[in-house]
Image: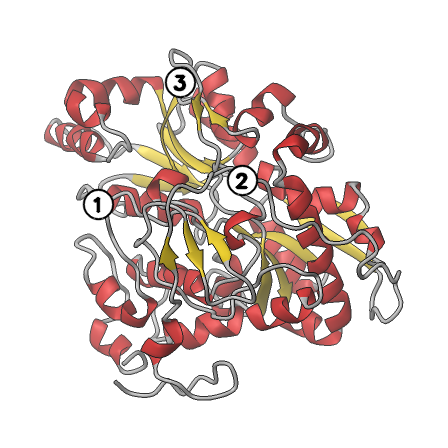
Amino acid sequence: MTKDKTPLDGKAVDRRSVLKTGGKLLGAAALFKAAGAVVPGGAWAAGGEGLEKTDLTLGIIPLTDCAPLVVAHEKGYFAKHGIKSQISKEASWANIRDKVSIGALDAAHMLAGMPIAASLGIGAIRKPTITSYSMDLNGNAITVSNELYDRMIEADPEAMAERPISARALKKVIDAGKAVGEAPMTFAVVFPVSTHNYELRYWMADAGIDPDNDIRLIVIPPPQMVANLQAKNIVGYCVGEPWNERAVIAGIGKVLITNYEIWNNNPEKVVGVNLDWAEKNPNTHMAMIRALVEAAQWMDKPENRLEVVEIISQRSYVNAPVDVVKMSMTGTFRYSMDEEPRPLPDFNVFYRYGATFPWKSHAAWFISQMICWGQIDKPVDVLKTAGEVYRPDIYRDAVKGMGIPVPSVDWKTEGTNDGPWMLTDATAPLEMGPDRFFNGDVFDPAEVLSYIDGFKVKNLALSMEELSKLNT
């Protein structure tokens, strides 16, 4: 195997060796175990001394997973680390992208793929952007109208009775519609490079649905999803909470599958900053990360979740009823009004399972999807790009001395753990959660070309031969 010229941990190593984690599968650890050791109250409480910038404006979208930024602001974690924070609620992900790019926001709640897209110039002017902090795992779902749900039940009741639900019944509905000349159905996602877009496409493509030709996909900001479903402008969508439960409670839709079921403990949002901002403000950047880690530890304690719900439900943040927001945030999820809520303790994970660590392998998976669906039309070195955008080195420097277990590796294979397991390549053993894909796929970043080529449904904008020149 050829050497990867990207410096990793200060030296050139082959791709395979840098991706090994050495994790071991363990038995029955509680999935909703309280967060680990709390950071001592006085640690890092040095005010604003040494910070290059103390007044920060931080952007959010009204979703439950904006919580780390909001809680760090409301509960005083930013202030403890010398940061005078201001939270700016934005109307769309495009607003977030553009305002961070021009410096109107210092940092922001971002979709996990957004810093990659900004750095590559996908959909906007190229602006090198990085993340050194992962905000959460899971948190999304696919919801459809009651009418489409009924058609899917009629088309394939057996498929609809399975858990997790595949898109096989939807494929039959689509094929039946084509046979009688129906126009393609319209689904919505929140942004072209969103986790939601890739999750919906991945779920559909597994059943043989081509999301670029068999349906119509449009972009709608999260808070507008429910109104568009009710107006019949769309038949379904993939979005974060509380906008799935909002449709269920309103009686106009049913949830088919959560993204936890599509990919257990998948990365969802990150905190994104311009690369030049990070280089000018390294101490401020690290203080922000420390504050967010402390907030995440507090949030993942079950006894604090109701207070988190009360904070983020406010009009200035998510602006949704407490009863709707608390459903997923307190470990239950309602798929339809004619069913009782089901336990789903890991629907929102903010600290457990190394959730705050920016894995380069997660970035590589998102790049693989951008390639699969034609968003990248020029060859890129997938692992090199992942390492330039996702920065665990900055995370490690920031949390040094906080007494928390931190991975000592940057990459891991996804899809091989059906239950809790222990990552031993860390400063202390780190309990991790399941990482199974719903269809049994395995993503090994060392074999990213084979992974991309293995998709039966894909729409590449460049050839595998072109990709192989930079990825062998």
Residue 198 rendering spot, x and y as whole percentages: 37, 49
Q: Which mark is residue 206?
A: 1
Q: Of helix, strand and loop, which one carries label 2? A: loop
Position above or below: 11 against 120 = below
For marks 1 and 2, the one nearer the N-term is 2
Label 2 sits on residue: 33
For marks 1 and 3, the one nearer the N-term is 1
Separation (CA) of disc 1 from disc 2: 33 Å
Q: Is residue 37 left or right of residue 9?
A: right
**Residue in the image at 34% along x and 42% along y:** 262
Q: Is residue 298 visible?
A: yes
The quarter holding residue 13 reads bottom left
Residue 149 rendering spot, x and y as whole percentages: 29, 21
**Residue in the image at 85% along x and 58% along y:** 45
Q: Of helix, strand and loop, which one carries label 3? A: loop
Label 3 sits on residue: 336
Residue lying farthest to the top in this orientation = 338
For marks 3 and 2, the one nearer the N-term is 2
Q: Residues within 10 Å of mark 1 (few under 14, many from 20)?
A: some
In front: 133, or 125?
Answer: 133
Q: Residues within 10 Å of mark 3 (few under 14, many from 20)?
A: many
Q: Which amino acid does the dot numbered 1 rest on? A: Asp
Q: Which amino acid does the dot numbered 3 rest on? A: Ser
Separation (CA) of disc 3 from disc 2: 28 Å
Question: Is the Cβ of the residue at disc 1 closer than 8 Å to that at disc 3?
Answer: no
Position above or below: 43 against 184 = below
Question: Is the Cβ of the residue at disc 3 closer than 8 Å to that at disc 2?
Answer: no
Residue 60 rendering spot, x and y as whole percentages: 65, 46
- Mark 1 or 2: in front is 2
Q: Is residue 34 left or right of residue 196?
A: right
Q: Of helix, strand and loop, which one carries label 1? A: helix
In front: 400, or 127?
Answer: 400
